Every structure is written in C-alpha cells, then in structure tokens.
Image (cartoon, helix red, strand yellow):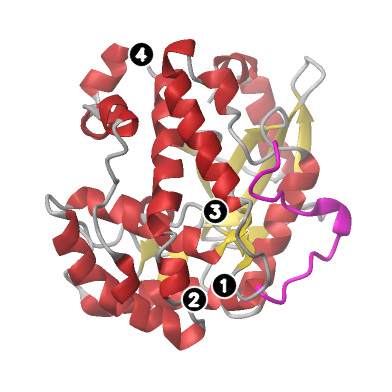
Amino acid sequence: MKQEIRERFNDAILREAQARYGIVGQMEALDGFESFIYTFERDGERYILRLGHSQRRSEALIRGEVDWINYLAENGTSVAWAVPSPQGNLVEPIADGHGDFFLATAFVFAPGGRGPWPMGHDAAFCRNYGRLLGKMHRLASTYQPRDPGAKRPFWNDPANNIQLAHILPPADAAILAKSDALIAHFATLPTDPTCFGLIHQDAHGGNFHVDENGTITLFDFDDCAYMWYANDVAMVLCYGSMGWEDGQAFVNTFLPPFLAGYREEWEINGRWLAEIPSFMKLREIDLYAIINRDFTPEQIAQDGWLNRFMTGRREKLLQDVPFLDVDFTGF
C-alpha cells in the first residue's frame, strides 16, 4: 500500500464506514496488503469490511468486482459474496479530505480456515481446488457485466498494471525489458472465450478458506481482470510451490489431481499449460518490484517469506532462471 494512502486513513473515516454499514461493537483489524481489512459481526453472522482507495481502484472497478463475485455466487460457486449496506449499496464511497475516496465494501466471512500447507499431499483437496477454478472459468466464458460501465480491466490496461517503469530503478532496466518482452508475447495470444475471460488472478492459499467438509471458499477478488485462464492455474502453482523444496516433486504431486478436478468443469490443454512458465515469470517480476517498493531492506530481512523470496531474486531474473523448471505440457 502506498504510504500516501496510509497517511490519509484515520479514525473518522473508519467510523463513517461503520455508520454506513450499521456496524455496532468492536471490529478486528486483519492484515491487508493493499486495503484496510476488518471483521465484524451482525445478527450472529461474521463479515468482512474492506476499505480500499480510489487512487488504486475506482468506484466503477469495485462495482465490477462485486458484480462478478455475486454472479459467481448466484451460479453456485463457493465464493465470499458481497453484501449491501443498509442503504442498498454494494460500494460506499467515503471522502478522504484530499479530493479522493476510500471505498468501503462488505463481504460474508468465508467459513473454515486456511487450507493444508504445504499443499499437495491431500489429493481430494487438490481436486476440489481445481474444480473450483474450472467452474469459475466455465462461468467466465459466458459472463456479461450487468452494468457495462462497471467492467473490470483487461490484463494490459493501466488500471490492472503496476506500471513497472515507474517502480523499477534505472539499475533494473534489464528486468523491465524482460517484462516488456513477456507482455509483447502475451499480446500475440488468442483471446476467445474458450481460453480468455475474467479471472481471479490471485487464487493462492492465502485467499481461500476450507471448512470441515472440505469446501473451499474463495475470496479477495481485488485483482480480478480479463486474462487467460491459464494464468490462474499458474498462480496456484507459483505460490503453492513455495511450500516445497523440490518444485518438480510439488508439480508431480499436486497438478494431476488439481487438473483432474479442473477438467470436470473446463478444459485446459498442453497449448495453455505451455504458457504457465511465462505467466509465472511476469508475476515473479511484479512481486520483485512491489516488494522493493513497499518494504525496506530491513523489513525484508526480518520477514521470513519476503526474505526467502527476495534472496537471490534479482540474479535469477537477470539470468532467466525459470520460477519452476518443469515441463507442464505432459499433464
């Protein structure tokens, strides 16, 4: 989160958000990477209150996000759907005093808790995970926003792009060039509904809960955008592999049941599995840039996950070391 946005947030804005949603009693603050996140209870049910900022996502983009989430929920997908305020609004804009807005949105709290980690050892979980993404992509192939003015961005839209040229320092010009080459490659790929549509973009283990029955409920659609379905699969593999020492062993264990579940709902073939390393590499570059932007070297050193990811990362990017050195086309 940009420091400027952190500095604009205050108790008055939070109290106004509580009033808009009729929240009484205490709220619990949760960790949020790009938004302020809280839990609250109402009528015995637990909910999430999210406050993002209009500098990052416009009100129209947030309305597009919740339309997509609620469409998925209405069609039987296990997602944490958006709930309206007492005024009937799915998004409540709150002026920040500087000409911009904090945008408040509420969601049901996903039942259960974090899934198995490291992931891959529970074949039934892997299959359910794949089935969930396959169903989401099947629904994406025919989805039309109810409000055309609240459509989510395409993958190469500035609203979806972290603008690496403004983040990476001149010393990382070679890394920026690698990102540009990936983007140029993606621009040559087909975009018909069999392979391209509205996707989550961040469906890793930190963005879903699993209940006692094994049901996976996906949340945090903040990054959803029109992109290739294979990118969602790539992100699952990218983050899931971080719990394993041996990337090939992870893929061999996790991917067969995951794809078996996925293919119950939607098809993915070797043509698109071959693109997974490229999608992973773009995320690897983006994470490298965002972490360097948002964290000091001291903070990176003190955080286990950040430290593991960033150790030697620049050299790996410069030397074109694959994030996972695996041939995915045979799965």
Majority SS type along the magenta span: loop
Q: Please provide the residue range marked out in magenta.
A: 141-158
Q: Residues within 10 Å of mark 1 (few under 14, many from 20)?
A: many
Residue 47 numbered mark, or none: 3
Disc 1 vs disc 3: which is toward the camera?
1
Image spot of residue 313 (x, y percent) = 28, 30
Q: Residues within 10 Å of mark 3 (few under 14, many from 20)?
A: some
Residue 137 numbered mark, or none: 1
Q: Is residue 141 left or right of residue 45?
A: right
Q: Amino acid at mark 1?
A: His
Residue 134 numbered mark, or none: 2
Image spot of residue 311 (x, y percent) = 22, 27
Quarter of the image holding residue 199?
bottom right
Say whether disc 4 or disc 2 marks the residue closer to the N-terminus. 2
Q: Nearer the viewer, residue 315 or 251?
A: 315
Q: Amino acid at mark 3?
A: Tyr
Say whether disc 2 or disc 3 marks the residue closer to the N-terminus. 3
- Helix, strand or loop at label 2? It is helix
Check if mark 2's residue and mark 1's residue have beta carbons within 8 Å.
yes
Image spot of residue 27 (x, y percent) = 51, 39
Q: Amino acid at mark 4?
A: Thr
Residue in view at x 80 percent, y 52 percent: 89
Alpha-carbon distance for marks 4 and 2?
A: 38 Å
* In the depicted structure, whether residue 319 falls above or below residue 98: below
Tell me, yes or no, if residue 120 can be seen here: no
Tell me, yes or no, if residue 55 can be seen here: yes
Alpha-carbon distance for marks 4 and 3?
A: 33 Å
Asked if residue 152 is among those painted magenta in the image, a careful observer would answer yes
Asked if residue 320 is among those painted magenta in the image, a careful observer would answer no
The residue to which callout 4 is attached is: 296
**Picture quarter with the C terminus:** bottom left
Say whether disc 4 or disc 3 marks the residue closer to the N-terminus. 3
